[in-house]
Image (cartoon, rainbow, N blue to C red):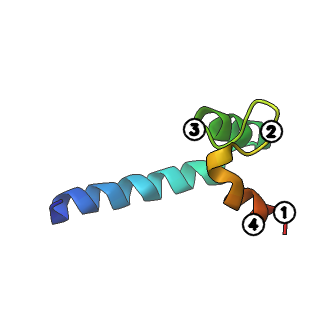
Amino acid sequence: MSDKDIAKLLELAKTKLEEVKSMTKKEAILSLNDSGILTKKGEFTKAYSELEELVNR
């Protein structure tokens, strides 16, 4: 991966972080559903069970 590619990825990440800051709770949950992190019932999928443990602390 070139420095140019890395710079593009960093810029994309910054843009997405700014978008997240203005999301509603419903939009955030739908985003987690769409990405496969949460089920429709709001539970973490098996692949993210460790994240669930961190969230529930």
Image x and y of residue 39, in percent: 73, 34
Sooner in the amino-acid sequence: mark 2 or mark 3: 3
What residue sits 56% from the left and 48% below the top? 19
Image x and y of residue 50, in percent: 68, 61
Tell me the CA gap for discs 2 and 1. Answer: 13 Å
Tell me the CA gap for discs 2 and 3. Answer: 13 Å
10 Å neighbourhood of mark 2: few (<14), some, or many (≥20)? Answer: few
Tell me the CA gap for discs 2 and 4. Answer: 16 Å
Residue furthest front in the image: 46
- How many marks can you see? 4
Under circle 3, the secondary element is: loop
What's the mark number on residue 42? Answer: 2
Dot 4 corresponds to which residue?
54
Tell me if label 1 and label 3 are in contact, CB under 8 Å: no
Camera-near label (3 vs 4) is: 4
Tell me the CA gap for discs 1 and 3. Answer: 20 Å
The reply, left or right, for residue 3 in relation to residue 32 is left
What's the mark number on residue 56? Answer: 1
Q: Amino acid at mark 3?
A: Ser
